[in-house]
Image (tube, rainbow, N blue to C red):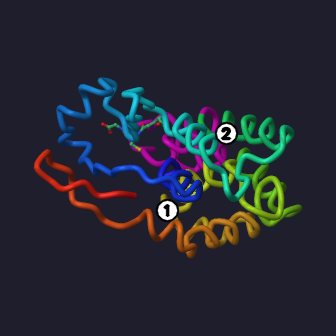
Amino acid sequence: MRARLAIKQCDITVELREITLRNKPQEMLALSPKGTVPVLQLPDSTVIEESWDIIQWASKLNDPLNLRGNDQQIDDTNELIHRNDNEFKTHLDHYKYADRFPENPAGHYRTEAGIFLQTLEELLSKNTYLLRGTPSLADIGIFPFVRQFAHVDIQWFRQAPYPHLIQWMDGFLNSTVFNSIMNKYTPWSPQDDAIFL
Ligand SMILES: N[C@@H](CCC(=O)N[C@@H](CS)C(=O)NCC(=O)O)C(=O)O
């Protein structure tokens, strides 16, 4: 989701091949044996197989909205994304799949995830977006994970003490760019005509 958002916001055209995780095409596994999405193949055959690396590639190629920002914002983004992809993602997965981690109740994992959410809430109480008044790569890179967190128990989330975070998430959910990447695509098969994101 975040790779698609960045590619769209950077106004780059890529061919899109939707896949089903339960039935990964051999063509995908040949490019990227680790079998996770997203995977991007460049015209020179380089393969990028981490969403954050795809975002870096896209924003370095074309950045009409200045999503990368200045050097300080790039550093702040990297720090937030590091916390998101490690600390927050771990607590989020425990919260989402709490039945697989029965040593603690779901509420425990939710509280742990809340430490990072509190950081986001504080940033968003100062600016409309995480680093400034307009979106940056930090927002694009983190929003899909906050959305996942929210939807584990949306009723709880909507009454949680994160008013700015809720408003920020709703802004993305209602945005044209988010709704355009949420199109439902039929899984790719080799005889299909190319479709583009
Ligand atoms: N760090 C990777 C994580 C990618 C990832 O785990 N993607 C999930 C789907 S959101 C996946 O492909 N899982 C493989 C599977 O379920 O078989 C990235 O951000 O690109």
Judged left or right of residue 168, residue 144 is left
Q: Is residue 7 above or below residue 71?
A: below
Assess whether residue 13 is covered by the magenta stretch: no
Report x, y in % for residue 19: 25, 47
Q: Residue at x 64, y 34 (%)?
A: 87
> Quick check: 197 above or below 14?
below
Where is residue 99 shown, x and y percent of the image?
A: 40, 43
19 vs 57, nearest the viewer: 57
Which residue is identified by label 2?
Answer: 81
Residue depicted at 57% across the width and 73% down the height: 175
Question: Any atom of ligand 1 within 8 Å of the CB at mark 2?
Answer: no
Q: Which residues are magenta?
A: 86-113
Picture quadrant of residue 121: bottom right
The residue tagged 1 is 151
What amino acid type is highlighted by mark number 2?
A: Ile
**The residue positioned farthest toward the front in the image shown:** 44
